[in-house]
Amino acid sequence: MARQDLRRASPCKHGYAAQPECGLASGTIIYTTEGALPVEFLIPGDRVITRAGARVLQGVVAKAGGFILSFKNPEVIYADGIETLAA
């Protein structure tokens, strides 16, 4: 997959979509047990599909750079169909 595809979900230069200083851009699609939802529609308690299975979302923080998702443990989620690290 091209590096430009990884950047689509994030304003970060390094291409990872869910790093603390970056975040996920508004409109980024996140896969949940309720279906695919834009990141701005997520709330704590939603079950997000991760590489390891469904995990409960602990928090969502909106920052200038985008949305930061937090879990009990770091998870690899699917943001716009791209594997993305989330804390």
Image (tube, helix red, strand yellow):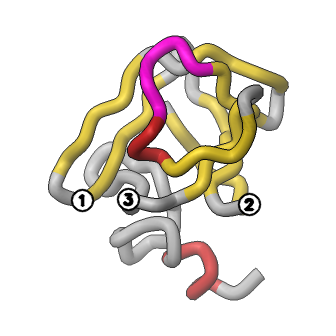
Q: Residues within 10 Å of mark 1 (few under 14, many from 20)?
A: some
Residue 59 shown left or right of residue 81 in the figure = left
Mark 2, secondary structure of its residue: loop
**What x and y, as percent, mark residue 49?**
75, 33
Q: Position of residue 47 (x, y in %)?
A: 66, 20
- Relative to 12, does residue 61 appear above or below in the rendering? above
Task: Tell me the residue that label 2 is attached to.
Answer: 81
- Closer to viewer: mark 3 or mark 2: 3
- Classify mark 3: residues with Cα within 10 Å, few (<14), some (14-19) or many (20+): some
Q: Identify the residue shown where x is 68% and y is 40%.
A: 76
Query: Which residue is tagged 1?
Result: 65
Part of the protein shown in magenta: 42-46
Q: Which mark is residue 26?
A: 3
In x, y percent, where is residue 12? 36, 69
In reply to whether residue 12 is colored magenta, the answer given is no
Q: For numbered disc 3, what is the local secondary structure? A: loop
Residue at 77 percent of width and 81 percent of height: 1
